[in-house]
Amino acid sequence: MKENIIQVKTYAFALQIVKIYKHLCEDKKEFVLSKQLLRSGTSIGANIEEAIGGQSEKDFYAKLTISYKEARETKYWLRLLQDSGYLDEEKAIKVLIDVEEILRVIGSIQKTMQSKNSNP
């Protein structure tokens, strides 16, 4: 079975987010922003999984769109945590690069699907 790159990337990303969440709670005693990050950051991969198991192409696209939105939200929380000093710049930049890559891949899949559906 061929490896699904977005599935692999979003799962690895979710693991990073869980580790950041633990760090923020245990070391920084930050519980509000970190919970938002955990929710949105792990939701990206969960929605990719749902998309892959979708019942139709329309269902797949809908879940993919949710993943894209969750990735955008995650980027926001990461930037806020970095700029407020809860997340050190080196770690934040690495994870922000990862979320940008996820956004590019999901966006590319969306564009491919849109062009395929507009060309009969």
Image (tube, rainbow, N blue to C red):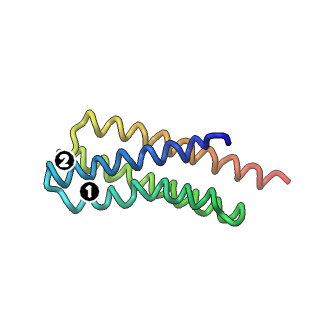
Mark 1 is on which residue type?
A: Ser
Given the current orientation, which residue lies at the most extreme front position? 1
- Judge whether 62 appears above or below 107 on screen: below
Q: Residue at x 14, y 55 (%)?
A: 29
Q: Residue at x 49, y 53 (%)?
A: 45
Q: Report x, y in % for residue 56.
A: 71, 64
The quadrant of the rendering that contains the N terminus is: top right
Residue 7, disc: none
Q: Which residue is mark 1?
A: 34
Q: Report x, y in % for residue 88.
A: 21, 39
Callout count:
2
Q: Is residue 33 left or right of residue 100?
A: left
Q: Report x, y in % for residue 44.
A: 47, 55
Given the current orientation, which residue lies at the most extreme top position? 90
Label 2 vs 1, first from the N-terminus:
1
Q: Which residue is mark 2?
A: 86
Front residue of 31 and 103? 31
Mark 2 is on which residue type?
A: Tyr
Given the current orientation, which residue lies at the most extreme right position? 120
Q: Place residue 30 in its image quadrant.
A: bottom left
Q: Is residue 41 left or right of residue 107?
A: left
Q: Residue at x 28, y 37 (%)?
A: 91
The kind of secondary structure element at disc 1 is: helix
Front residue of 62 and 119? 62
Q: Is residue 88 left or right of residue 93?
A: left
The kind of secondary structure element at disc 2 is: loop
Contact (Cβ within 8 Å) of mark 2 with mark 1: yes
Neighbourhood count class around disc 2 (C-alpha, 10 Å): few under 14, some 14–19, many 20 upward:
some
Q: Place residue 62 in its image quadrant.
A: bottom right
Neighbourhood count class around disc 1 (C-alpha, 10 Å): few under 14, some 14–19, many 20 upward:
many
